[in-house]
Amino acid sequence: MELPPGTFGFAAVVLAGGRAARLDGADKASVEHRGRSLLEHAIEACVDAQEVVVVGDPVRTTRPVTFCRESPRYGGPVAALLTGRDALVRPPRTVGVLAVDMPRVTPWTFRRLHAAAVGHDGAFLTDAAGRRQLAGVLDAGRLDAVRPDHEGQHGMPIHRLLSSLDLVEVPPEGDEGRDVDTWADVRDLADEG
């Protein structure tokens, strides 16, 4: 399918600016796994994206990305996703979204999500129990169509934003659907080496 002029195929938004309440407010993005921060793992998972926006505080990264913050801060994943969407330089056909606390997600994960999304509005990875995780791809036009006004997006659960969309749920391969929410999860990561 030919894209409209000036349109990218795939751009990604990494959500890296949450409060991390279950980690006592620690900066999840800077937690290290296998010698690299969770943010670097997230950026690497989005390697197929022509543009990556990180919604979080700016830090040095190995790949060029754009940093931005939702206003006001800590508006939740919907506000962060839509802020990141707005920060993209060129409109994409597909928007990827990835929470920074999912270091087992890889480029292969996003390729599977794209394949599963064909003919649908998007696809999201689940964990082993079948719960939808913050790792997915969305048709940019369909995302724009369900977008609430600025006031409505703060504090909105992501499942409510996406409730009217036709989304495919993709089961994880191995542990790729696990996130890092607690200090026990951080210890589990350290045990993986």
Image (spheres, rainbow, N blue to C red):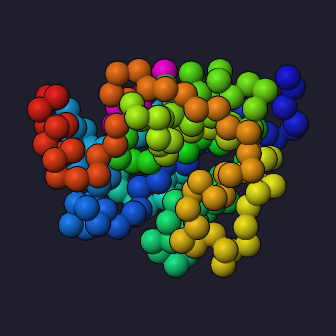
In this rendering, would 148 be left or right of 66?
right
**Residue 140, horizontal then vertical, whole percent:** 74, 45
In this rendering, would 189 be left or right of 113?
left
| Quadrant showing the C terminus | top left
Residue lying at the far front in this picture: please name it: 129
> Quick check: 105 above or below 69?
above
| Quadrant showing the N terminus | top right
Q: Look at 58% across and 67% down and name the residue there.
A: 156
Q: Nearer the viewer, residue 133 or 56?
A: 133
Q: Look at 59% across and 27% down and name the residue there.
A: 113
Q: Say whether residue 189 is magenta.
A: no
> Quick check: 105 above or below 98?
above
Q: Say whether residue 107 is magenta.
A: yes
> Quick check: 73 above or below 188?
below
Q: Look at 51% across and 34% down and name the residue there.
A: 125
Q: Which residues are magenta?
A: 103-108
Q: Considering the whole magenta stretch, tell me its main secondary structure.
A: loop
**Residue 98, horizontal then vertical, whole percent:** 49, 44
In the rendered image, which quarter is residue 42 located in?
top left
In this rendering, would 122 be left or right of 35?
right
Q: Total label count? A: 0
In this rendering, would 152 be left or right of 78?
right
**Residue 82, horizontal then vertical, whole percent:** 63, 60
Q: Look at 74% across and 39% down and name the residue there.
A: 166
